[in-house]
Structure formats: C-alpha cells, structure tokens
Amino acid sequence: MTFHSLIPRRSVSRSPLARGSLRAFWPLEFDRLFDETFPSFGFGAPAQEVPSFSPRVDVTETDEAYTVKADLPGLEEKDIQVSLEEGVLSIQGKLDSEKEENKPGVRYVERAHGSFHRAIELPAEIDSAKVTASYRQGVLTVTLPKLPEAKPEVRTIPITTS
C-alpha cells in the first residue's frame, strides 16, 4: 500500500536569497527605503494618500513657566489647533500645499500633504487660564505659566551658634 502526502512538495529554489545566505545582509530597512522612494513602481504597499509626520518639539522649563516650541514649516495659522485638557497639551495640524512653476519647455509641480497630532503630558501645576500660543516664521510657541504655589520658594535660613 502506498501513502501519498496531501501537502504539495515545493521545488527547491536555486536563488541565494531563498537559501537565506544573502537575505541576512539585506535588512528590512532596505525594503522600506525602496517602498518609500519608489511607491509608484509597486515595490511594496501603495503609498498613503495623506501620510502623517511628526514635527520636532522642544519643551523647556523655567521657574515661571513651561515653553513648548514646535517646528511647523509650511503651515498657516489656520491649519494649526492647540488645546489643553487635563494636563495634556495637544498640537494638531494639516498640511495641504501645491506649488507650480511653468517655464518655457518645463513644468514643475510640487505637492505636500500630511497631518500630525502631538500630545505632551504636563504636570498639573499649569495655570490653564494664562496659557498663550504664538506662531511666527514656521515656529509655534506655547507658553504654559505655572501656578503660584508651584513656583519654587527660595528662603535664606539663618545659622545660629550655640
């Protein structure tokens, strides 16, 4: 009696990548690089229509306040939303821009699309009624003053001799 396997047998590939010898030298970052660089050539998954990005944010603290600076080049003030809820500062925005340049024999079109959302948890010692935000030359600056009781008190203690 002859037994046959129900699992089809795969043919052995002669490709060095199939054996794993060269695959170890081809990191996954290379695949990601090709996918991001050539999305229309079908190297990987199709590109997202609205990719997200994460702007650089600096948070500094002084005795009087916290300051949050976010680099948001290319955005307009109307495209940015700042909110403070339960000690969490949220900065959101959406970028939709198109630049077209026509020269004799050349047409150049550049588009930028994307959205972001950054949430920064801050200590509860923020005076939310006095929070201010300003936007100038692509930099958003949010100033979050501390409550008076949260400010450090420096007191000189006299030394006595016995």
Image: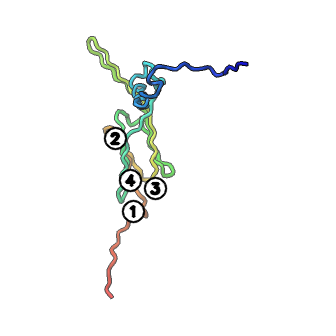
Which residue occupies the foreground of this view, 114 or 39? 39
- Residue, disc 2: 139
Q: Nearer the viewer, mark 3 or mark 2?
A: 3
- Residue, disc 1: 151
Three-letter amino acid code at disc 4? Tyr
Disc nearer the start of the sequence (3/2): 3
Looking at the image, which residue is at 46% across and 28% down? 20
Which residue occupies the foreground of this view, 28 or 47? 28
Q: Could you give the CA–CA distance between mark 3 and mark 4, rounded to whole angstroms?
A: 10 Å
The percent coordinates of residue 141 (x first, y second) are 36, 45
The percent coordinates of residue 132 (x first, y second) are 39, 48
Which residue occupies the foreground of this view, 150 or 20? 20
Q: Could you give the CA–CA distance between mark 3 and mark 2, rounded to whole angstroms?
A: 23 Å
Q: Nearer the viewer, mark 1 or mark 3?
A: 3
- Residue, disc 3: 123
Three-letter amino acid code at disc 3? Pro
User: Which mark is on residue 18?
Assistant: none
In the image, is 2 to the left or to the right of 62?
right
Which residue occupies the foreground of this view, 117 or 3? 3
Crowding at mark 2 (Cα within 10 Å: few <14, some 14-19, many 20+): some
In the image, is 16 to the left or to the right of 71?
right
Looking at the image, which residue is at 41% across and 38% down? 54
The percent coordinates of residue 96 (x first, y second) are 41, 28
Crowding at mark 3 (Cα within 10 Å: few <14, some 14-19, many 20+): few
Q: CB under 8 Å between callouts 2 and 4?
A: no
Query: Regarding mark 4 in the picture, which secondary structure is present there?
Result: strand
Task: Spot the residue most to the left.
Answer: 104
In this view of the protein, can residue 96 be seen by the observer? no
- Residue, disc 4: 66
Three-letter amino acid code at disc 1? Lys
Query: Regarding mark 1 in the picture, which secondary structure is present there?
Result: loop
Query: Regarding mark 3 in the picture, which secondary structure is present there?
Result: loop
